[in-house]
Amino acid sequence: MTQPAPVTFADLDLDTLATVEGVVACLIPEAGTLDAGAKRLNRLTKGAVARAVESPAWGKLSEGGVLEIGFPVGMEATCVALVRLDRKASGGDAMSAGAALAKLRGTRALAVTASAAQKSVTELALGAALRGYDFNDHMTGEDKPAAAPITVLTPKFEEAQAAWTDAAAQAEGVFLTRDLVNEPSNVLTTTEFANRLEKLRDLGVEVEVLEEEALAELGMRCLLAVGQGSVSPSKVVVMQWNGGGDEAPFALIGKGVVFDTGGISLKPAAGMEDMTMDMGGAGTVAGAMHTIAKRKARANVVALVGLVENMPDGNAIRPGDVVASMKGDTVEIINTDAEGRLVLCDVMWYAQERFKPTGMVDLATLTGAIIIGLGHENAGVFSNDDTLAGDFLAAAQAEREGAWRMPLGAAYDKQLKSRVADMKNVGGRPAGSITAAQFLLRFVQDGTPWIHLDIAGTASVAKGTDLSPAGATGWGVRALDRLIRDRCEPNG
């Protein structure tokens, strides 16, 4: 797994600033008031810091923006970075500032000076760590060095270091998700995916891999139908973290289509290479479980992912086929490219039958329609429970992960009506993401609070985000971790 840059917090020793190498950054409020660290840097740079914060360029910076002084005279550093950040800045602004510093530093070491009054230094370090991700496993040439360290120099270093433990767990979980989603499908087969999930045992997670024979005995015919055209065996991986008491667990469910050709309803060739990310829901669930276990959450959480590959061979499922789900409902296959809901419906039903969860969230790169509706800024949130939906939306907002609630309603069920089976697997172009959610709702048992997250627009992006480079974002890991913390842990 790609490792985040090592982050440490240390006491602010002004006498060492002249010899620090790499990038040295200081945090300065909008008014340009210099704290002790900034004053020392100003002295070392012969007044350059003061001149910079009095310049028009400083006035144009937004909160979290950075102004660079290159190759400062009198210092070993190659750069002094002045960060506009109020001492009471929000965690989100601090993360943006850290991300800006990560882009500026590149592969260089980073040291940040902060006063005792500066809040959110942990969030700043997390932003820098998250933005520093680089997936280069398949690049040849020179050996890739480990990420250079990030050091935050602050009088309250012990308090910040203690707070970093949970933030570091989040960073690792996000990096795991990004690695999985970025991995090419000839590497991340269903078998390799399961093997990587089994490594969560090292953190105390119980991991069980259900093979095709067991899935057939359970009646997961919809899930198996998706993978029957592939040589890669379909699997369901069950992960249990038992950090709470005797209460029933909260359930996380992930769609893990390691590659999606569309099956017989073949996708267009242009852009099909992006379908390596169609296991983004399962990848996010894996990252969330890593974080939950790493920080030893005081909650019971069970995660299940359905791992399949959707390929068009002579044994592939066809449009017009009728398949029975584990629940017993029959589904007429109209479009074999609407396969994710077939995977999820069986896994969701199994999770409820076996674990009787207190609540359930499923994640899937499910529909292109959600991208038309929400773009790449927000995931679609569908729920049968206002309290759970509110809890998740609050968690997502706190973690600055875009999420927007979408409607459900019985009127949409008419689009799923089939002439030959209990339902169709698609409802046509109108409200495509909503009818997909309505399909899944039929597999939610009475009394189970449930959220469906359509992450097709947020799991991987072409141009990157504030906190991630182009490719996999790791969206949802931090929001799910906060949801578990706030909803399921005592005194969360």
Image (spheres, helix red, strand yellow):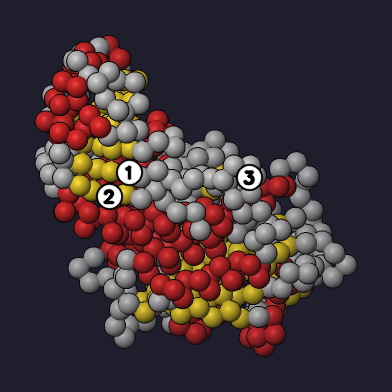
- Mark closest to the chain's N terminus, 1 or 3: 3
Q: Position of residue 172 (x, y in %)?
A: 41, 57
Badge 1 element: strand
Please name the residue that numbered disc 1 is placed on. 150
The reply to whether residue 328 is in sight is no
How far is disc 3 from disc 2 in space, using C-alphas? 29 Å
Residue positioned 65% across, 85% down in the render: 214
Q: Position of residue 48 (x, y in %)?
A: 23, 16
Please name the residue that numbered disc 2 is placed on. 8
Residue positioned 51% across, 58% down in the render: 1
Quadrant for the C terminus in the image: bottom left
Amino acid type, label 2? Thr
Quick check: 246 above or below 432?
Answer: below
Q: Residues within 10 Å of mark 3 (few under 14, many from 20)?
A: few
Q: Residues within 10 Å of mark 2 (few under 14, many from 20)?
A: some
Q: Residues within 10 Å of mark 1 (few under 14, many from 20)?
A: many
Q: Position of residue 364 (x, y in %)?
A: 56, 59
How many tags in the picture? Answer: 3
Amino acid type, label 3? Met
State if disc 1 and disc 2 touch (CB < 8 Å): yes
Question: Residue 372 shows which numbered tag?
Answer: none
How far is disc 2 from disc 1 in space, using C-alphas? 6 Å
Badge 2 element: strand
Q: Position of residue 113 (x, y in %)?
A: 21, 36
